[in-house]
Image (spheres, grey):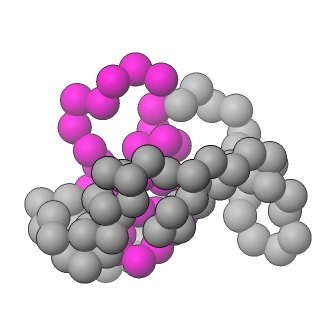
Amino acid sequence: MKPLEDLPRAYRMNGTACVIAKALTDNVPNTGKSWQVSVDTVYRYSREVGEDQPIVDEWELPEDVKEFVRLFDMGEYPELIEEALP
C-alpha cells in the first residue's frame, strides 16, 4: 500500500465506513474483500460484511491507531467527519 497523502472523510462509530476502513478500501488493490474496523482490530472479510461471512484476515491495530480510532469516534477530528450516512 502506498503512503497516504490525505485521510478520507468518513463516518463515526461505523466500522465499515470509518476513516481506516475507507482508507483501506480506497488504497489497497481491489481484492474483492471488505474491511471492518473495531476499536482495536481490523478485519478483512471474503466478501461484503453481513450474514455469516468468514473472516479472511484479522490484525490488531497499533496503539497510536487505536487512539486515533477512539478520538475520531468521539468527534475529535471534525475535518474528517461525514455528518450523515448516504
The residue depicted at 12 percent of the width and 60 percent of the height is: 79
Q: Nearer the viewer, residue 75 or 61?
A: 61
Image coordinates of residue 58 in percent, x first then y, are 69, 50
Quarter location, residue 16? bottom right
Image height of 53 relative to 76, above or below = above
Q: Quadrant of the C terminus?
A: bottom left
Question: Main structural element of the magenta stretch: helix, strand or loop?
Answer: loop
Q: Residue furthest top?
A: 2
Boundaries of the magenta span: 1-27
The residue depicted at 15 percent of the width and 64 percent of the height is: 77
- Give yes or no for residue 76 being in the magenta stretch: no
Image coordinates of residue 1 in percent, x first then y, are 47, 23
- Can I make out residue 72 in this image? yes
Q: Is residue 81 left or right of residue 27?
A: left
The residue depicted at 47 percent of the width and 68 percent of the height is: 39
- Give yes or no for residue 19 being in the magenta stretch: yes
Q: Nearer the viewer, residue 40 or 19?
A: 40
Tally of numbered discs: 0
- Can I make out residue 82 in this image? no
The residue depicted at 29 percent of the width and 59 percent of the height is: 68
Q: Is residue 55 left or right of residue 84?
A: right
Q: Is residue 83 left or right of residue 60?
A: left
